[in-house]
Amino acid sequence: MMDFTEDQLQRYSRHIILPEVGGKGQAKIAGAKVFIVGAGGLGCPVGYYLTAAGVGTIALVDNDVVEMSNLQRQIAHSVNTLGMPKVESAKRTFEALNPDVRVIAMQRRLSKDDILDLIRDYDVVVDGSDNFPTRYLVNDACVMAGKPLVSGAILRFEGQVTTIVPHDGPCYRCLFEEPPPAGLVPSCQEAGVLGVLPGVIGALQATEVLKLILGKGELLKGELLIYSALKTEFRKVKVPRNPSCPLCGEHRTITELVDYNEGYCAMP
Amino acid sequence: MEETAADKRINIKGLVCPYTFVKAKLAMESLEVGQVLEILLDSEEASRNIPRSMEDHGQKMLKNEKINDTDWVLVVRKERE
Ligand SMILES: [Zn+2]
């Protein structure tokens, strides 16, 4: 049993009184280590809520610096952190919210050469990346390492969330075997996004992470949740495992990580 | 009401909701199923809310008694984790 300080008792009281959480669940949250890819539209709300929830260790990976055009949706950053690496800006915000949480800021790109080492010590990976090369790299690494992955994506008024539990449900390649050609991905001019949309999707991702940590509830495993902000509508699409998935199927053809070429527009 | 020797006693006088229940729940979590917790409190609101919450969580209230002008004693048996 975790010994809570008086501050912690007060901070986490609304968790502790939930039957599904309790002191034991809160101790699990405190002991959890979550790896967040991207400190942008999705990474900000995911990290913010997981920090508030008291997740013990949060790693943030992102190579970008804060720009004015980010502030319409990337809620961990501010005019005071313009020009600062996003991971550093977010770390300051999260540490101000909850000093219990250890935030590890990594300003860098993920590559096939280091991602497996970087995620090794973490319990859950969250994908809030803004491009297909990273999305596939993170998916492949999580399947190879057997790490649960909570994946989110946003565009214009629509967002998607799914939770990938390797070899127990489909992976991202079961849905889409290969990344789309760069030319088919919307260009920067086309790729607008409603600022609150990543808040909705990121909060759903953070919820999945907490359920994974607590071992409670039903995960979005084998299901893609699609949210339409314009219609105010949630749809769940069942996604079966693909027996011929090149990554997690019966005859695996992808046995090494791949770095796909860049050339995609960065958005969230 | 049956008299049962408590395995653990807590005094949460001076606390208000929700900390009354937070303390009571944490004390319950530290017990084994079948063990008994005795709670001394002085919040009239908590004397109504704690028993209800404990029963919502599947625990068994054995006693809820006002013992003087200001204080209540609750006795709860742990029925489940
Ligand atoms: Zn697959």
Image (cartoon, helix red, strand yellow):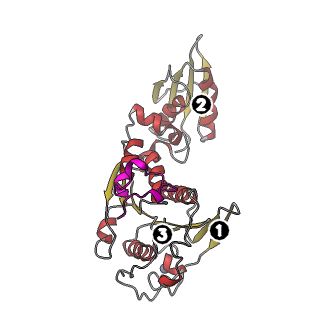
Q: Chain of mark 1?
A: A
Q: Which residues are magenta?
A: A62-89
Task: Say which residue appears at 47% left-offset and 86% top-offset.
Answer: A250
Q: Earlier in the sequence, mark 3 or mark 1?
A: 3
Q: Chain of mark 3?
A: A
Task: Say which residue appears at 34% left-offset and 83% top-offset.
Answer: A256
Q: Quadrant of the N terminus of chain A?
A: top left
Q: Front-most of B35 and A186?
A: A186
Find residue A144 and report its horizontal and vertical position in percent: 38, 75
User: Compared with residue A137, is residue A149 higher up or lower down, i.e. above or below?
Assistant: above
**Discs 2 and 3 carry the same chain letter:** no
Q: Check disc 1 and report its element: helix, strand or loop.
A: strand
- Confirm or deny contact between disc 3 and disc 1 (CB under 8 A): no
In terms of secondary structure, what is the magenta stretch mainly? loop
User: Compared with residue A32, is residue A168 higher up or lower down, i.e. above or below?
Assistant: below
Q: Is residue A63 left or right of residue A43?
A: left
Q: Amino acid at mark 1?
A: Lys
Residue A85 bears which disc, if any? none
* C-alpha separation, residue under disc 1 versus residue under disc 2: 38 Å
Disc 2: which residue: B50
Find residue A228 and report its horizontal and vertical position in percent: 65, 65
Q: Amino acid at mark 3?
A: Val
Task: Say which residue appears at 45% left-offset and 56% top-offset.
Answer: A68
Q: Is residue A86 magenta?
A: yes
Viewer-nearest of labels 1 and 2?
1
Q: Front-most of A228 and B25?
A: A228
* C-alpha separation, residue under disc 2 versus residue under disc 3: 38 Å
Q: Which quarter of the picture shows residue A254?
A: bottom left
Are there few (<14), some (14-19), or many (20+) residues within 10 Å of tag 3?
A: many
Disc 1: which residue: A236
Disc 3: which residue: A165
Are there few (<14), some (14-19), or many (20+) residues within 10 Å of tag 1?
A: some
